[in-house]
Amino acid sequence: SKTLRIGLIPADGIGREVIPAARQAIEALGSTIPKTEFIDLDAGFEYFQKHGKALPEETLQTKTDTITWNNGSSPSTKVAGYSSPIVALRKAMDLYANIRPVVGVSASGKPSVDLVVVRENTECLYVKQEKLEKDSNGKQVAKATRVITENASRRIGEMAFKLAAARPRKHLTIIHKSNVLSITDGLFRESVRDVSKGWPDVQVAEQLVDSAVYKLFREPSVFDVMVAPNLYGDILSDAAAALVGSLGVVPSVNAGDDFVIGEPVHGSAPDIAGQNKANPIASIRSAAMMLRHLGYEDAALRIEKAVDTVLIEATTLTPDLGGKATTQQCKYQGERIETLL
Amino acid sequence: SKTLRIGLIPADGIGREVIPAARQAIEALGSTIPKTEFIDLDAGFEYFQKHGKALPEETLQTKTDTITWNNGSSPSTKVAGYSSPIVALRKAMDLYANIRPVVGVSASGKPSVDLVVVRENTECLYVKQEKLEKDSNGKQVAKATRVITENASRRIGEMAFKLAAARPRKHLTIIHKSNVLSITDGLFRESVRDVSKGWPDVQVAEQLVDSAVYKLFREPSVFDVMVAPNLYGDILSDAAAALVGSLGVVPSVNAGDDFVIGEPVHGSAPDIAGQNKANPIASIRSAAMMLRHLGYEDAALRIEKAVDTVLIEATTLTPDLGGKATTQQCKYQGERIETLL
Ligand SMILES: CC(C)[C@H](C(=O)O)[C@@H](O)C(=O)O
Ligand SMILES: CC(C)[C@H](C(=O)O)[C@@H](O)C(=O)O
C-alpha cells in the first residue's frame, strides 16, 4: 500500500514550533489518509549562516509527495547574500500558483470575510534579474526586470477561473496597474480576460492594485476570487490577512501541475520565536490545503472543521487572537484540534 | 505687489467638482495670501479623446507658481494608448516627493491615525520602460524595468527625515522588499540609512512592504513617517487612506525643489462624477499643503483648521463619510469651510 512521503521544512524562527503542529494534525487523521512518512529537510537563514547557502541541493533532490514549509524571510533584510529560498523553490518546482484563502470564522456560520487571493508565483519582479550600475558621476543605479508572460498569465488565469467557478459567487477580480504599466500589466489583464471566454459562468471585474487594497479594507465583500501578478498578490494577501484577525490563521499552497507545498502566509517571526506562543493554525490549515490538493478531500475537511471549531469556541487561542494558549503546551490548540479529529 | 498664479487642472470626472471647491477655499482666505490669479489648464482622459494626447504642451509651458490637479486615472485601463498624465507631469517638473499625510480627526483632539507617507515620485516602475517581445513559440513576453538610484533614494530620504524631525515622534520607517529585490530595494534601503546619519534625533525602523500593509491595518500607531519607493508608496497611501474613513479626505503634494502640485489621493471616480456628491476635502487639504509649501503657513493652517472643524461638527458631510451633503449646493462643506475662514 502507498506511503505518503511528507517533507517538513521548519526553516527558521517559529517554523520550529508551527510545522511540528501541522505534522501532529496530519498524524491525528489516522486512517483517513494512507500511512505517512515525514522527512525533515533543511533550508532557511540559520542553514545559510552555517553552510553558506539557503537551499541545499539535497532538499531539492529528496523525493517527497508534498512539503510543508515555513518561510524564513525576516532576517534576510539584514544580511548580504541571503534571500528567502522559498522564491527559488517555487521556481525550481514550477509551483506557479500561490493560493491564499482568507476566511473569517463566525459562530453564525456566515463568514465575515471569504475570499481567495490567487497569486502568480513564478515571474513579475520575482524573476530576480537585478543589476547594479554606475552613472557618469559614479553614483549607483540599480535595475530590476519585471517579466510578465502570456503563458504564465493564462495559466494562473485558468487556475483562478477554475477556483471561482467552484465557489457560490463565481466572481473573479483581475488585479493590475495598467494605468501605469500598460504593457506588462496590460498583458496580464488581456491574457486573463482571454481565458475568461472559456468560463462564461464566472463574472469578471478588475481593480487597480492601489484601490484594491483600499477596497479590501473598506468593503471586502466585493471580492470573491482575486487573481494578481506576483508582487501585488504578495501585498494583497497580507492586506486580506489583516481582515481576519491575524496573519497566524492564513494558509497557502504553492501549487504546480505535479507538486504542492503548503506554506503559512506568515514568516519566521523572530520577535516571538522560541516563546511557545506562535499560532499554529496557518500551518495546520496549509497542511489541509496540501492534502486537498493531493486528493484527500475528507482529510482536508476534517482538519478545517476542527480548526473552525477551535476558533468558534475561542477558549484555546494564542495571543495574536487575544488568548493565552501556547503553541505546544497545556491548552495547546493542536491538542484540541487533535481531539476533534 | 506679487500675484500668486495658481494653475487648475480639473482633468476628469469629479475633478470638475472638487478642484473648483479648492479654488473657493483659497479665494476665501482673502488677504492671508497675496492676490491670486487662477489659470485653467488642460490634461486628462477627455482631453486625450478629443486631441489624441493626455498632456498638452501648453499646460507644461504655462508659467504658474503652483498647480492644483485632479488625477484622471480610472478610464485608462480600458483605452489603448492612454496612460495617466500625472506620471509624465511629475517627471517633467522633477517633482520627486509625493507627500501624503493621513490624519484621522477626532473631537478629543488626539487623532486616531496620524502618519505621513513619503513616496519617491520619479522612478521605480514608473519610469515606464516597457517592451513587448515574443518567445520562440510566438507567445508574448512583456518586460518592464524598475530603476532605483542612489541619488533619488537619498533625496527622498532627506525629505522624509526633514519631515520626521519636525514631528513630535521623530520616527521614520523605511519600506522595502529587499528579501526579494536585494539590489534595487537594497540600494533604496542603504541610501536612506546612509542619510539617517545626518539626523541623529530621528529613530529609524524598517518594514517589508507586505507586512507594512498588514501592520497599517492592525496597528497603525506604530507608524509616524514612512518612506517608500514609488509603487509601494502608491499602494501604502491608499491603504492608509482606508484608515480615516474615506479616500475623499486624503490630500497630497507632488513636490520638487522649485515647484509643487497639490493632488487629492483619489482619482476621477467616474461612478459618482457629475452627481454633486464628491468629497471636496482631499482637494481643499491639498490646496493647504500647496500653500504651506509656498511659504504661506498661516493660510495652510487656517484651511486645515476649518476642515477639521467641519469633520468634527459632522453635520455637513458628503456620502462617503455617511452624510448627505453635496459638493457644491445647499449644505456644501466648502461653504461651511468658507464661513470658517
Ligand atoms: C519571504 C518572501 C520571499 C515571501 C514572498 O514575498 O513571496 C513571503 O512574503 C510570502 O508572501 O510568501
Ligand atoms: C493615476 C495613477 C497614475 C496615480 C499613481 O499611481 O501614482 C495614482 O494612483 C496616485 O496615487 O496618484
Image: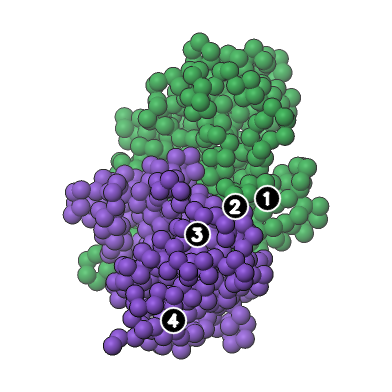
Chain colours: A purple, B green
Q: Residue at x 52, y 69 (%)?
A: A334
Q: Position of residue A144 (x, y in %)?
A: 48, 64
Mark 1 sits on what residue?
B222
Chain under numbered label 4? A
In the rendered structure, find residue B215 and report the number of the disc placed on it.
2
Q: Position of residue A112 (x, y in %)?
A: 44, 45
Element carrying mark 2: helix
Residue drawn 67% across the image and 66% down it: A271
Gap between marks 1 and 4, in whole Å? 37 Å
Q: Judge by depth and name the residue closer to the eye, B326 or B16.
A: B326
Q: Give how far across and how far down residue B197 sits, in percent.
A: 77, 59
Q: Earlier in the sequence, mark 4 or mark 3?
A: 4
Quote the CA–CA distance across marks 2 and 1: 8 Å
Disc nearer the start of the sequence (2/1): 2
| Quarter where residue B281 is shown | top right
Q: Nearer the viewer, mark 4 or mark 3?
A: 3
Say which quarter of the image contains residue A219. top left
Question: In the visual, does A334 lie left or right of A146?
Answer: right
Q: Amino acid at mark 4?
A: Gly
Evaluate if marks 2 and 1 touch, with contact meaning CB atoms under 8 Å apart: yes
